């Protein structure tokens, strides 16, 4: 780690607001992107990003520089996003807005009808938030299980189990609607 | 659910929820963070108080545990 960065982290740990601002501007985009992947709503992602950095500031004395700022911040962001999903669970059960990003790939299969995609998104929104987070990060975003485990504060085996349960529940929900994946 | 079913449902999910590859907030969020810091002065969260209360209650019922608790503080 560079001396300058190490110094900023030490100052942040002591509660220095300028150091916190430096870290905020270094990591704002990364943390926002991580949260957006989970909540899939740009306005909500901005609110949760603000909440995340507020929590980060509140917890500055507990920060351990050896762990690295980004992984620590991502863990706090994941829990803030989980709180948001729990608080807005009923909204998430309504059709999810597709996240339109300029570099998102056109990966949709034209043979798959828009209705099936929408029903799948709706069914996914009905899953328990803790299963949804694991599935969206590991399956949709294809993040490594280890990274997801660190962000959620659980083991890799627990991530795999949550993903499996999420997929099984999703399949069951779709089958009840007459959709056979 | 076998491996084939799992792959199919994963594929369906990826098509229903396209991945987010590059994203940034529409504006700088620092002013909003500052407003939140001003509005909500930092204080110990409720679960810290609950933990402290639980430890005190535990120590009151089992005084012999006090040295062990002090050791881990």
Image: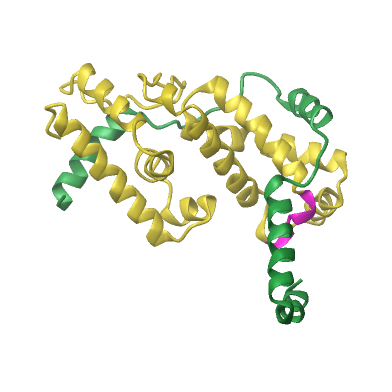
Q: Give the x, y percent position of residue A96.
A: 38, 21
- Residue farthest along the front direction in this orientation: B61
Q: Work out which quarter of the rendered image holds the C terminus of chain B and state it.
A: bottom right
Q: How is the image coloured?
A: by chain
Q: Give the x, y percent position of residue A29.
A: 62, 33
Front position in the image: A29 or A3: A29
Vertical order, A115 against B41 (above or below) = above
Q: Residue at x 34, y 43 (%)?
A: A139
In the rendered image, is residue A155 in sight?
Answer: yes
Q: Residue at x 69, y 53 (%)?
A: B50
Vertical order, B56 against B26 (above or below) = below
Q: Which residues are magenta?
A: A60-66
Front position in the image: B50 or A157: B50
For residue A173, which quarter of the picture? top left
Colour of chain A, in one word, is yellow
Total labels: the figure holds 0
Q: Give the x, y percent position of residue B8.
A: 18, 40
Q: Residue at x 23, y 17 (%)?
A: A114
Q: Which chain is green?
A: B
């Amino acid at each position: 780690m560079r001396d300058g960065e190490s110094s900023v982290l030490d100052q942040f740990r002591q509660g220095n607001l300028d150091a916190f601002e430096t870290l905020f501007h270094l990591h704002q985009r990364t943390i926002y992107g991580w949260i957006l992947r989970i909540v899939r709503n740009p306005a909500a992602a901005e609110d949760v990003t603000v909440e995340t950095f507020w929590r980060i500031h509140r917890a500055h004395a507990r920060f351990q520089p050896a762990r690295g700022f980004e992984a620590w911040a991502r863990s706090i962001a994941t829990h803030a996003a989980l709180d948001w999903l729990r608080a807005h669970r009923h909204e998430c059960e309504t059709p999810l807005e597709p996240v339109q990003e300029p570099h998102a790939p056109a990966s949709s299969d034209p043979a798959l009808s828009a209705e099936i995609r929408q029903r799948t998104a709706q069914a996914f929104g009905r899953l328990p938030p803790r299963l949804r987070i694991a599935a969206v990060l590991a399956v949709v975003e294809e993040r490594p299980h280890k990274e997801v485990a660190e962000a959620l504060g659980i083991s890799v085996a627990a991530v795999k189990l949550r993903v499996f349960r999420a997929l099984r529940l999703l399949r069951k929900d779709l089958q009840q609607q007459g959709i056979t994946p | 659910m076998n491996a084939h079913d799992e792959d199919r449902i994963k594929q369906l999910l990826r098509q229903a929820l396209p991945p987010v590859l590059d994203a940034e907030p529409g504006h700088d969020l620092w002013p909003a963070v500052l407003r939140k810091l001003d509005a909500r002065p930092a204080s110990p969260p409720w679960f810290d108080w609950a933990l402290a209360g639980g430890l005190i209650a535990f120590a009151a019922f089992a005084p012999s545990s006090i040295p062990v608790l002090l050791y881990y503080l």
